[in-house]
Image (spheres, rainbow, N blue to C red):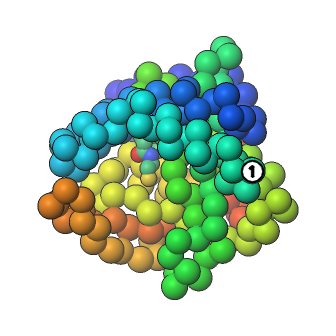
Amino acid sequence: MQLRRRYAVRVRQAVEADARALAEVHVASWNDTYRGLIPDAAIDARTVDRREMHWIRTLSDLEQRIGVKTAEVDGWVVGFLHVGPTRSPALGFSHELYAIYVHPDYLYGGVGRMLMSTVGTLVAPLGMTSLFAWVLRENHPARRFYESLGGVVVDERVEEMDGAALMEVAYGYNDLDDLLAQACR
Ligand SMILES: CC(C)(COP(=O)(O)OP(=O)(O)OC[C@H]1O[C@@H](n2cnc3c(N)ncnc32)[C@H](O)[C@@H]1OP(=O)(O)O)[C@@H](O)C(=O)NCCC(=O)NCCS
């Protein structure tokens, strides 16, 4: 049986100076989560330096930065989420959870739930009315996470990555009040 821990988590708006820390969490999580699920080449190409450039670009754009939240435990960045306008408008959701990542050392300790409990603060600044997320079909812990927040599967697709065909499913949240209630449980 997996021992559950509960961390004292502080979630705050990301700032430009978070770029390196977000890149470190991002790369550690990719290595831990996706090895065996997606081609090694795609994982190995995600270096901390490259991800840091991505985060510098994202965080220096105010409109994008508004949708990025950082989770800290004992002053260390251990997770983040990134929400923005939908990239799959046909699904009918106003906004998309582009990414949510918790450092492998802090998984299943309430950090992800705490991050999601703050999406209410994005409703007004982003004009968000609903939310969805794509997740790899075989990423079972993440799917359990989305389901625990009341998400329902609303679509499936095949994504090509380094020659591999990856199945993804979309979890949708039409009722943001319900999502927040589930996240704050
Ligand atoms: C998905 C992720 C963000 C969840 O964050 P987390 O801090 O580990 O999750 P929490 O501890 O807040 O768990 C919240 C709920 O999710 C579910 N859950 C989370 N991890 C789980 C696991 N390993 N097994 C089963 N259920 C799990 C549980 O229902 C849990 O509810 P509970 O607290 O009532 O038991 C985190 O696991 C992660 O970063 N995974 C790797 C990256 C990833 O897959 N991101 C999603 C990409 S689409």
* Residue shown at 63% from the left, 61% from the top: 84
Q: Report the residue marked by disc 1.
A: 62
Taking 125 as reference, is 44 above or below it?
Answer: above
Of residues 77 and 176, the one nearer the viewer is 77
Residue 152 drawn at (x, y percent): 50, 69
Q: In the rendered structure, which amino acid carries the disc numbered 1? A: Leu
- What quarter of the picture does the C terminus occupy? top right
Count of marks overlaid on the render: 1
Taking 127 as reference, is 42 above or below it?
Answer: above
Residue 75 drawn at (x, y percent): 68, 16
* Residue shown at 16% from the left, 60% from the top: 164
- What quarter of the picture does the N terminus occupy? top left
Residue 29 drawn at (x, y percent): 40, 34
Residue 158 drawn at (x, y percent): 27, 71
SS state under label 1: helix
Horizontal placement of 49 versus 11: left or right?
left
Taking 70 as reference, is 126 above or below it?
Answer: below
Q: Which quarter of the figure has residue 138?
A: bottom left
* Residue shown at 41% from the left, 54% from the top: 143
Of residues 181 and 87, the one nearer the viewer is 87
Q: Which quarter of the figure has residue 159?
A: bottom left
Q: Which quarter of the figure has residue 28?
A: top left
The extreme top residue here reads: 74
Horizontal placement of 142 versus 11: left or right?
left
Taking 169 as reference, is 120 above or below it?
Answer: above
